[in-house]
Every structure is written in structure tokens, then in C-alpha cells.
Image (cartoon, grey):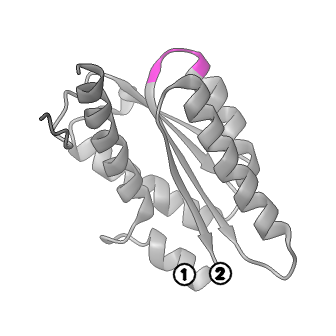
Amino acid sequence: MPTIQPEQIDNDFEIAIVVSIFNEEITENLWRGAMKVLLSEGFSEDQIVTVWVPGAIEIPLMVQQLLASGRFSVALALGAVIRGETSHYDYVCQQVSFGCQKVALEAEIPVIFGVLTTENERQAFARSSDNVQNKGAESAHAALQFLSVLQQAEML
């Protein structure tokens, strides 16, 4: 019985990263965490295209546009949505997560959801700090692991 688990893969592909400018201090930290992982895995800066969009709600459409080019094997969606005093938070979180999932399923290309959805800024900073808890770094690791699994599954 075959078992598929993440393995090291060749880094002969390009990666798209879409990052929200809103909450930029946090999202820039997520981006830095992702870049640190990708560069340490042997990717060159030329293999990574980063697009900054105004807010989290714009992430899915930009990911869709990038994936439609046929150039990218995976996309990272990075942003930070922090609960405020209104229900706006709930709508944004739902739309961004749904949009990223829909794009991934339609394009049949992984879209790794690295959008923080936190109750407050303290939680967001904790998840974007330059340490092992950085969700941008986790998203980059998840992208590489999922591509490995996906490639293996395609060979079954």
C-alpha cells in the first residue's frame, strides 16, 4: 500500500506571494518569514514574485490573476485581519478564506492560506514575529510540503 508523505523536492519552479498592505508592519513580517524559508531552501529571488495588494479582500483576485498566467506552481496568500468593534472582521475573514480556496480548486494549483485572523494586535504580532511561530514561514514550509505530496499523488 503506497504511503505519501512530504519529501524534499527540486526547486525548479516559481512561487507567487500575494501580501496585504493593510496591517503592513505585521504582513511585512509574514513576508519576511516566508522569504527566509524559501531562500534557505535554495530558491532564488528571481523564482519568487511578490505582489502587494491594498487589503486582505483583494488577495484572492490577485492570486487568481497570477495563477492564470501558468507561470506559478504555488501561491502564498499572506495578510492580517484583526477583529475590531464591528462585524466587518467576520465578513472579511470569510470572503478571503473562501476566495483563496475557490481559486485553488478552480486553478488546481495550491494556494496556501497564510492570512492571520486574530482577536487583537498582540496575537497578530506574536504570529508574525521573527521566530518559529511566524505564520509566513509556516506557510512557505506548507507550500513546499504540499507540492511534494501533490507531485507524488499525481504519479499514482
Q: Is 138 situated left or right of 105 in this image?
A: left
- Secondary structure under the numbered disc 1 in the rendered image: helix
What segment is highlighted magenta in the picture?
Answer: 68-72
Residue type, label 1 = Gln
Q: Is 1 situated left or right of 26 in this image?
A: left
Q: Quadrant of the N terminus?
A: top left
Q: Is 153 situated left or right of 92 in this image?
A: left
Q: Quadrant of the C terminus?
A: top left
Q: Kindly identify the residue that appears in the image at 66 percent across and 25 percent down.
A: 65
71 inside magenta stretch? yes
Q: Quadrant of residue 68?
A: top right
Q: Position of residue 129 (x, y in %)?
A: 42, 72
Q: Kindly identify the residue that appears in the image at 48 percent across and 17 percent down.
A: 71
Q: Quick check: can you spot residue 29?
A: yes
Do the CB atoms of the residues marked 2 and 1 lie less than 8 Å apart? yes
Q: Quick check: can you spot residue 55?
A: no
Q: Kindly identify the residue that appears in the image at 14 percent across and 34 percent down.
A: 2
Q: Kindly identify the residue that appears in the image at 47 percent across and 79 percent down.
A: 126
Toward the viewer: 105 or 58?
105
Q: Position of residue 74 (x, y in %)?
A: 44, 32
Q: Is 108 situated left or right of 133 in this image?
A: right
The residue indicated by pointer 1 is 123
Q: Main secondary structure of the magenta part?
A: loop
Residue type, label 2 = Glu
Q: Position of residue 153 (x, y in %)?
A: 28, 28
Q: Is residue 132 above or below residue 49?
A: below
- Secondary structure under the numbered disc 2 in the rendered image: loop
Q: Is residue 12 above or below residue 110?
A: above
Q: Position of residue 102 (x, y in %)?
A: 65, 37
The residue indicated by pointer 2 is 119
